Amino acid sequence: MLYEDPRNRCCCAIKIQIGALIIACIGIFACLCLMLLLLILGRFLFATVPLILAAAYASIFYAHYAKTPRLYWPFLVANGIAVAVGSLYLLVLAAMFLLVPHFWQRWLNESSDFQHQETIMQYPRLVTGCIGAVMLFVQVINIWFELVVYNASTFVQRQHFISQHGAHKV
């Protein structure tokens, strides 16, 4: 009866807990790839962020196998912070896209190989728009991850309630 609730299904009719485990696998893999890239680039301080996020994604595994809804919260908090920071970054990018400040245009033009005047004028908006589109996609994915893992947490919480109090009190 608990599995029939639509809140307990992820995309493609996958059980919400399996969806959370898939999210954990994807997140850990992405965090490890990002950490490796940052280490190769010599950004050792920034490499700690994917390490912390990988630990938050790993908490999903631990929560699933321990059947404890509170253990989903490290991911939910870390991902919530990432969504908030990403939203602020998107606002800054939107301002940069609309205004194209001189320092931003100069930095983008110096870091490119384009020398034609018409290309130099359009390049900052193109790059800013592409970065913004990628960030918007990442934000949507992170919000969806948050919803799936939160639903997995509430599912485990309802399972605990049913096992302790019986199905007739639900």
Image: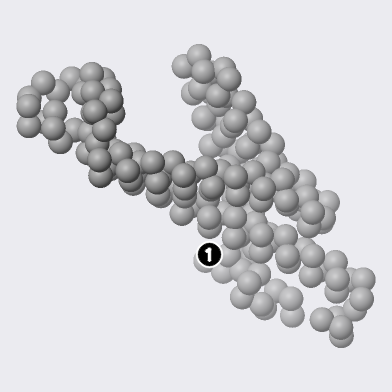
Query: Given the image, on which type of amino acid does mark 1 rest?
Result: Cys
Query: Helix, strand or loop at disc 1?
Result: helix
Judge left or right: residue 65 versus residue 135.
right
Relative to 11, is 73 above or below? above
**Which percent across, then down, holds residue 51?**
63, 30
Q: Residue at x 66, y 59 (%)?
A: 150
Q: Residue at x 74, y 76 (%)?
A: 2
Of residue 98 and residue 138, the one placed in the foreground of this image is 98
Query: For the residue carrying disc 1, how many other residues have a C-alpha within 10 Å: few (<14), some (14-19), or many (20+)?
Result: few
Residue 134 visible, this angle? no
Judge left or right: residue 49 versus residue 37.
right
Q: Residue at x 46, y 44 (%)?
A: 88
In the picture of the structure, the residue carrying the numbered disc 1 is 11
The quarter of the rendered structure image containing the N terminus is bottom right
The quarter of the rendered structure image containing the C terminus is bottom right
Of residue 7 and residue 70, the one placed in the foreground of this image is 70
Please identify the residue farthest to the left as the structure is shown.
Answer: 117
Please identify the residue farthest to the right as the structure is shown.
Answer: 164
Relative to 11, is 101 above or below? above
**Which percent across, then down, holds residue 90?**
40, 45
**Which percent across, then down, holds residue 43?**
51, 18
**Which percent across, then down, holds residue 164?**
92, 71
